[in-house]
Image: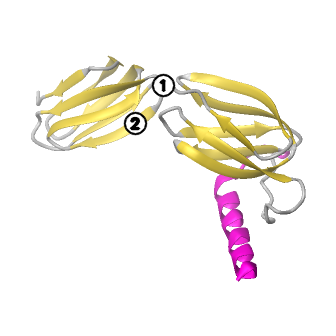
Amino acid sequence: MPKIRAILMCLVVALVTFAFTMPPAGLENAASITTQSPAVAGLVKLTFVNKTGATIPVLALKGAKTYYFYNVPTGQNTFYVPKGKYLVHYMACGRDRLKYFTITSDVKFITVACPTAKITILNKTGSTLFLYLSGPASYTLALLPGRTKITILRGTYTYTGFNSCVYASGTQKLKGGTAWIWRCD
């Protein structure tokens, strides 16, 4: 049974590694995380806790090798990397975030927590409203008629909203307690 568990662990690590470490085109020195078992000497567990309130599009670890992790969800994420000195780089709260640290054993890295806003969107158009927001984070929403409450990163957004009876775009500052009403033209 322990052998089967070890084989399954290796497969899981290999699948996760392949899915999250494809480097951008043109980066010849970019490396992908090894598909070997984490028990292989030199690999340590990096627990990355995303408290930003949004998915991080790209998380980069730059050191002797460079690693890219894409669409890192909120909450706890686990990666296996070699020991070494790294620069962690990601976008959060509308800013670049950089931090140098040395990994000598299993380690937990916790991101900043971005300020969030609870907003209410009242769709009085009678049909599904499609709303795209771009600002401190990006959101794509399909809102049924009626009241919808969402939590987003606080800040100023450019938006585009449309359905069969309305089309609008512009800039909107979204902060806690914001109520946004959509009606047909």
- The residue that disc 2 covers is 139
Q: Disc 2 on helix, strand or loop?
A: strand
Question: Is residue 17 or residue 169 the one in the foreground?
Answer: 17
Q: Are marks 2 and 1 in contact (CB under 8 Å)?
A: no
69 left or right of 27 in image: left
**Image quarter for residue 89?**
top right
x and y percentages locating residue 143 in the rendered image: 23, 41
Amino acid, disc 1: Pro
152 left or right of 184 in image: right
Indicate whether 77 appears above or below 119.
below
The structure residue drawn at horizontal position 69% and vertical position 40%, both measured from the top left corner, is: 108
Q: Which residues are magenta?
A: 1-29
Indicate whether 43 appears above or below 159.
below
x and y percentages locating residue 14 in the rendered image: 71, 65
Question: Is residue 67 or residue 39 the one in the foreground?
Answer: 39
x and y percentages locating residue 109 in the rendered image: 68, 37
Q: Main secondary structure of the magenta part?
A: helix
- The residue that disc 1 covers is 136
Does the magenta run of residues contain 5? yes
Does the magenta run of residues contain 140? no
x and y percentages locating residue 74 in the rendered image: 52, 42
- Looking at the image, which residue sits at the far bottom? 1
Give the position of the N terminus as an image quadrant: bottom right
19 left or right of 184 in image: right
Amino acid, disc 2: Tyr
